[in-house]
Amino acid sequence: MVIDSHGRIAKIADGDSEAEVLAQFDIEASGVKRLQTGQFMVPGFVDTHVHAPQYKFTGTGTDMPLMEWLKQYTFPAEESCKDLDSAQYRYDLLIKRFLFNGTTTAMYHGSLHLAPNKVLVDRILALGQRAVVGKVNMDCESPDTYVEETADGLREAEEFVQYTIAKACSRIQPCITPRFIPTCTPALMKGLAALARKYNIHIQSHISECCGAVSFVKEQHPNYASDAAVFDDMGLLTDKTVMAHGTLLSDSDFRLLAAKGTAVAHCPLSNFFLGDACFRVNHALSLGVKVGLGTDVAGGISPSMLTAQ
């Protein structure tokens, strides 16, 4: 395989053609990298679910149920990203580790505050990764110091989208990111759906992740049959939507997601530690649901796609 100076594949040939290819591209024999025993070459991995601000506690904090885990570990870690120097330091570590592990594309959840998300975009661009990035939105059932007013959240979400689009780089795209139903009012979810339609961009969130979250949604929205029904009525199920986990989705939920073209980010490690069931991958695929793999850093304890399952 010949890689040109722009990082593009210029030619693929079998080993018997080595001398001919070297001559064609004026390559010295010393410039050839040969894979050793146990090494392999694959296309770059695509991680469909990552929480960038949570990288600092990856591999820890799996000792409690999801809703408690969010309060104890997640929200404080994300809020600390208001320190932009610290955020840049952490994001550089994360992106470099992902690239080292072969993850050339990732779908990132950022944090609540606007400025750290801009830092995340800037560092992804600087370090050469491809990504879909979203500013997290949450306007209820959240800590007093880590919550936004609905109007402020919608305004900052749009500002983040415009900031990312203005980079004019095909490697990075903005994403609408309601954290999950329990922390988002209907007004916020509908407003975010309108932004996704306005800019024709991706949506990401969490769906039917564990018994605690599903029960919480049923208390908040008793007139809906499931998380999927809530998201659908809010306008958040589209063919550009990626929903994480889905371990407790019913067959009717799967069929709804398939009809809408919505994908699921399957996160085996975090499902094991924080979920209450296994995601039925083959069954979801058989019903027409698109499925990708995610590490779910930091609910997942490893930033490597090779150990994400």
Image (cartoon, rainbow, N blue to C red):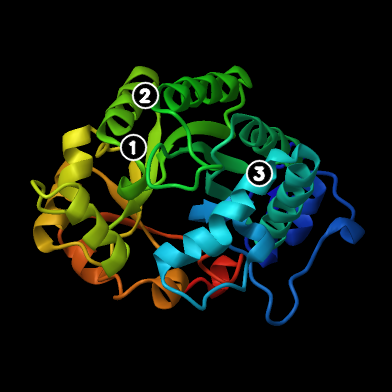
> How far, Cα to Cα, is label 1 from label 3?
20 Å
Above or below — where is 251 with respect to 27? below
Residue 188 lies left or right of residue 83; in this view the side is left
Q: Residue at 67% x, 41% y: name it.
A: 8
Closer to the chain start, of discs 2 and 3, is: 3
| Rendered image quadrant of residue 167 | top right
Q: Is residue 118 left or right of residue 184?
A: right
Q: Give, as a three-letter code, the residue at label 2.
A: Asn
User: Given this view, does label 2 or label 3 mark the residue nearer the observer?
Assistant: 2
- Of residues 275 and 104, which is closer to you in this image? 275
Q: Amino acid at mark 3?
A: Gln
Q: Secondary structure at mark 3?
A: loop
- Classify residue 123 as left or right of residue 31: left
Residue position marked by numbered label 1 in the rendering = 240
Image coordinates of residue 98 in percent, x first then y, are 66, 57
Give the numbered dot on residue 200. Answer: 2
* CB-based contact (under 8 Å), mark 2 and mark 1: yes
Label 2 environment density (alpha carbons within 10 Å; few <14, some 14–19, many ≥20): few
Residue at x 60%, y 56% (from the top left corner)? 54
Return the residue at label 3: 129
Contact between marks 2 and 3 (CB within 8 A): the answer is no
